[in-house]
Image: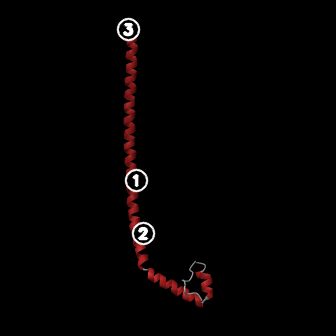
């Protein structure tokens, strides 16, 4: 009878350990679901913000590309002014890296 009692005791201990493992695995699964849901929400929010930023930046790029000829004309006028005013050319244009376009040298 002593072996029967000890085997019943070890079976009950094993049943308790299995039940504990089931509760622990359920808790971990629930935590995994919460963390993955939170991460998914965060990444979705970041993607939507990034999409809005891309749209805004694309509008700025389009505006710059539309005005490219006007900017080139302005730089050519600055270069022509710099040729007649050496102080301006040395102090402003060279300091800011605005070298005159080729063919407009003195």
**Residue at 40% over, 61% down:** 49
Left or right: 78, with 25 as reference point? right
Q: CA distance from mark 3 to mark 1?
A: 61 Å
Q: CA distance from mark 1 to mark 2?
A: 22 Å
- Which percent across, then down, holds residue 81? 56, 89
Left or right: 97, with 67 as reference point? right
Q: Which residue is mark 3?
A: 1
**Residue at 60% over, 78% down:** 95
Q: Residue furthest front?
A: 103
Q: Residue furthest top?
A: 1
- Which element type, helix, strand or loop, lies under badge 3? loop
Residue 105 vertical placement versus 97 (above, below): below
- Which element type, helix, strand or loop, lies under badge 1? helix
Category of crowding for the residue at label 2, using alpha-carbon neighbours closer than 10 angstroms: few (below 14), some (14–19), many (at least 20): few
Q: Which mark is residue 42?
A: 1
Q: Which mark is residue 57?
A: 2
**Residue at 59% over, 91% down:** 84
Q: Quadrant of residue 83?
A: bottom right
- Which percent across, then down, holds residue 9? 39, 17
- Which element type, helix, strand or loop, lies under badge 2? helix
Disc with the residue nearer the chain's start (3 vs 1): 3
Category of crowding for the residue at label 1, using alpha-carbon neighbours closer than 10 angstroms: few (below 14), some (14–19), many (at least 20): few
Identify the coloring. Answer: secondary structure
Q: Nearer the viewer, residue 58 or 56?
A: 58
Mark 1, mark 2: which one is toward the viewer?
2
Disc with the residue nearer the chain's start (2 vs 3): 3
Q: Nearer the viewer, residue 105 or 18?
A: 105
């Amino acid at each position: 009878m002593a072996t029967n009692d000890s085997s019943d005791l070890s079976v009950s201990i094993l049943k308790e350990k299995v039940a504990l493992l089931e509760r622990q695995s359920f808790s971990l699964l629930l935590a995994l679901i919460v963390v993955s849901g939170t991460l998914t929400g965060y990444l979705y929010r970041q993607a939507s913000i990034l999409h809005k930023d891309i749209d805004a930046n694309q509008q700025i790029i389009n505006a710059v590309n539309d005005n490219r000829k006007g900017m080139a004309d302005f730089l050519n006028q600055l270069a022509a002014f710099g040729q007649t005013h050496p102080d301006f050319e040395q102090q402003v244009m060279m300091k800011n890296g605005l070298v005159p376009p080729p063919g407009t040298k003195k």
